[in-house]
Image (spheres, rainbow, N blue to C red):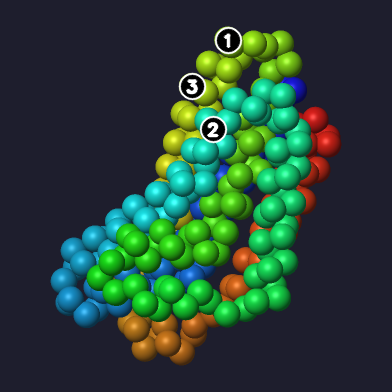
Amino acid sequence: MTIDGNSLTALWWAVIFSGIYHGINPGMGWPLAVSAGLMEQKHWALPKALAMLALGHLLAMLAILLPFSMMTVLLQWESEIRIGAGMLVIAMGCYLLINRRHPRILARVHPSRLALWSFLAAMAHGAGLMLVPIYLGICAIGSSEAGHLAARTLMGNNIGNALVVAFVHTMTMTIAGGIIATIIYFWLGLKFLSKTWFNLDIVWAISLILVGIFGIYSTYAGH
């Protein structure tokens, strides 16, 4: 299966926009960065907290994407795995629509352990799963490749793709969340945050379902 330039560009934009969306979503942790900065009353505390959140999010993305990158079975079952991944993401979205409660384990993590909190939050909310159908589309295999050479090419290229996808996604997430956190920290304050808190849980769940549908559609469409 090959992938044309327009489809590949669209998939990379999906990686970027999903990162921006994750960054805007307060459930991914930027309010914790604001709180850390205000409590410590030091300007460096805000970027430090954002860096820890980014590290945890990046590790969560890699924990989901790297196993897929090392599956040489993709050579034979690429379409089936892409469809299965899409269905898994749809199922996660449906679950989050039904169950609106946030995982209790997140409340038990000490506020100073932002990287651990970010990792668990991304895993619990299916942030990594959202990238799987997009990532598999980016890693679509050329039909001319076969045998051990294809397996080696797949392993090398797809591990690299997994790293790039995770880094690009995390970078855009951090920039988006960092902009919001900086505005609130320096100008609006925590009181504004408490009064204007917004919940994106329903939008998050629906976006998972849409990404899953997109992944299945792109597989059937040959992208």
Considering only order in the chain, which callout, 3 or 2, is on the residue closer to the N terminus?
2
Residue 57 placement (x, y as % from top left): 42, 55
- Residue hosting label 1: 149
Report, in whole angstroms, how far the alpha carbon at label 2 lies from the one at label 1.
16 Å
Report, in whole angstroms, how far the alpha carbon at label 2 lies from the one at label 3.
9 Å
| Horizontal arrangement in the rendering, residue 42 relative to residue 33 (left or right) | left
Considering only order in the chain, which callout, 1 or 3, is on the residue closer to the N terminus?
1
Q: Mark 1 and mark 3 in contact (Cβ < 8 Å)?
A: no
**Residue at point 58%, 47% (across, down):** 131
Q: Is residue 46 above or below residue 215?
A: below
Q: Mark 3 and mark 2 in contact (Cβ < 8 Å)?
A: no
Q: How dense is the environment of label 2, judged by Cα within 10 Å: few (below 14), some, or many (20 and up)?
A: many
Q: Is residue 28 above or below residue 5?
A: below
- Residue hosting label 2: 69
Residue 186 placement (x, y as % from top left): 29, 74
Report, in whole angstroms, how far the alpha carbon at label 3 lies from the one at label 1.
11 Å
- Residue hosting label 3: 156
Please tell me whether mark 1 sits on a helix, a strand or a loop. Answer: helix
